[in-house]
Image (cartoon, coloured by chain):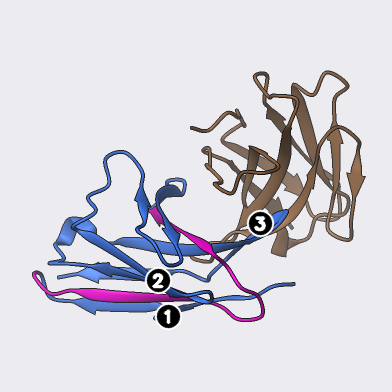
Amino acid sequence: DAKTTQPPSMDCAEGRAANLPCNHSTISGNEYVYWYRQIHSQGPQYIIHGLKNNETNEMASLIITEDRKSSTLILPHATLRDTAVYYCIVRVATGNQFYFGTGTSLTVIP
Amino acid sequence: GAVVSQHPSWVICKSGTSVKIECRSLDFQATTMFWYRQFPKQSLMLMATSNEGSKATYEQGVEKDKFLINHASLTLSTLTVTSAHPEDSSFYICSAPLPPKLFFGSGTQLSVL
């Protein structure tokens, strides 16, 4: 069962930072936060994941609150190609199944 | 990164026929693979876990006789939609774990006429 809550949609101006929130108030101590995105009619693409520390890679940054009950995915300079549905998922490190919630549909506006 | 290949990308079939979808992990081995179904404007729904060398485990409400899964090798899982009907029309997506990540195929759009 999905354990996350995300806003259904967001807009972002091209070139600006896109900040996508996720609530996971029932997260357990051994559960990681993962972010994937899905461009229309394609398979989901991995973006980033973390446990409790903030993480950054070439695609995005992940900010996790100290109590771990929420997180924010940051796309520092959004482009039109970042228009997609973004999914926040929590799962245990040793588990394999990923259960998807409803996600956030991000539209990057020229 | 790791690659999961899924074929075909799309298929159209007549009602009552069966359709097979293949999922391959190209550069890594996967003892488990996962099959999802996605209806338009909805999220991905996990259907089943494919286990190499043993029976698949199905999520609640998914008909195992309708959606046959075979995981014959460490790099190949197949999903067969048997006696397909129009309500089975959907986007089917496979995935394979390479911890700590899960990698997805490009999906198969099934249309049953």
| Nearer to the camera, B61 or A25 | B61
User: As drawn, is A48 to the left or to the right of B46?
Assistant: right
User: What secondary structure is found at the residue carrying circle 3?
Assistant: loop
Subunit of label 3: A
> In this orientation, does residue B39 appear?
no
Whole-number angstrom distance, CA of label 3 to CA of label 2: 21 Å
Give the residue at mark 2: B108
B25 left or right, relative to A82: left
Amino acid carrying mark 2 in the image:
Thr
Residue at 60% from the left image edge and 38% from the top image edge: A9
Q: Extreme left residue here?
A: B16
Q: Report the magenta residues as a range.
A: B16-38
Q: Nearer the viewer, mark 3 or mark 2?
A: 2
Chain B image colour: blue
Q: Position of residue A47 (x, y in %)?
A: 75, 55
Q: What residue is drawn where x is 32% and y is 60%?
A: B90
Q: Secondary structure at mark 1?
A: strand
